[in-house]
Image (cartoon, rainbow, N blue to C red):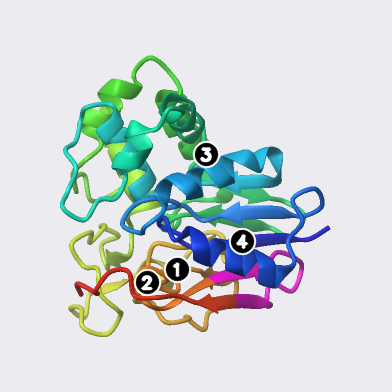
Amino acid sequence: MATYAIGDIQGCYSQLKELLSKLEFKSDRDKLWFAGDIVNRGPDSLKTIRFIKSLQDNAITVLGNHDLHLLAIANGRRKQGKNDTIQNILDASDSELLLDWLIQRPLVHYQKKNNVCLVHAGIYPRWTINQTLCYATEIETVLQGPKAHEFFHHMYGDKPAKWSNNLTGWDRLRFITNCFTRMRYINDNLKLCLKDKGAPGKQDADIHPWFEMERKEKDLNIVFGHWSTLKNPEYEHLHPLDTGCLWGGKLSALKINHKMKKITSVQCPEYRLPTL
């Protein structure tokens, strides 16, 4: 039995199937971890979400910002953008089942055996793994409860920018959500810099990739996606997997074991032109 983590698919179903063939994946034997953003902007979001849902317990999927965006639109709290490719999910005969499955996905997954954490964007540097899991549960409880519809009304926004244990209500939930699904950069004052999205090297001197800040959990293996312009950072215990499939890059899988080194990839067509 093998376990593989896979980066942002964003509806690139054909490349996912090609990657799984290359891995010789067997659904009755192996397990897959998906680092979020399984839908949107690519050509086959409906096929992708149906396939991943069909894997049942053999797949673990954490929510990414595009997955939450789909749920917000389905809840009438957001309008589709010109680059969205999710209408076929909303129109599908099994749309309600797919969306109900999606909203029950976690924000974070942790495996103690290899001390590895799966998340879409990242983990706030000052959080321990126990805090991380507790804060993820706060979001999951709201998403899966009676206030989900209201949550999507308050989800969007860049503030508050800095964590405080005193944060409450929607501000608290928005900050946690932004960390797990949108974060790339943090400044010297530990404030999220959500408007900075490009590759490292062009930011102000006080702005840094979140993983370059001193972290509470230095030995925690963090598998994440979200950042297609990030070239493999040579930091121990960090495993970025968004290798730009949507933009003509690759779709990549990392074998989850004590080594955390083996990456398998397939080349992808350029479905979208880069905007950065």
Q: Residues within 10 Å of mark 4 (few under 14, many from 20)?
A: many
Measured as percent of width and height from the top left, residue 104 is found at 51, 31
**Compared with residue 139, is residue 189 higher up or lower down, i.e. above or below?**
below
Please give the residue where the numbered disc 4 appears in the rendered image. Answer: 5
Left or right of 89: which side holds 111?
Answer: right
Mark 2 in CB contact with mark 1 (< 8 angstroms) = yes
Label 4 close to label 3 by CB (< 8 Å): no
Residue reaching furthest to the front: 93
Mark 3, residue position:
106
* Whether residue 164 is visible: no
Residue at image position (21%, 67%) is 196
For residue 257: magenta? yes
Q: Position of residue 31 (x, y in %)?
A: 72, 52
Q: Position of residue 117 (x, y in %)?
A: 59, 55
Residue appearing at x 19%, y 43% in the figure: 80
The amino acid sitting under disc 1 is Asp
The residue wearing badge 1 is: 242
- The residue to which callout 2 is attached is 228
Count of numbered circles in the view: 4
Distance in Å between CA atoms under marks 2 and 4: 16 Å
Quote the CA–CA distance across marks 3 and 2: 22 Å
Disc 4 residue type (three-letter): Ala
Disc 3 marks a residue whose amino acid type is Pro
Ranked by sequence position, the earlier of labels 4 and 3 is 4
Looking at the image, tell me whether mark 1 or mark 3 is earlier in sequence order: 3
Q: Which residues are magenta?
A: 252-264
Q: Is residue 169 above or below residue 80?
A: above
Judged from the image, the secondary structure of the residue bearing numbered disc 3 is loop
Q: Name the element at disc 1.
A: loop
> Is label 1 in contact with label 4 (beta carbons under 8 Å)?
no
Whether residue 213 sits left or right of residue 130 in the image: it is: left
Q: Nearer the viewer, residue 5 or 91?
A: 91
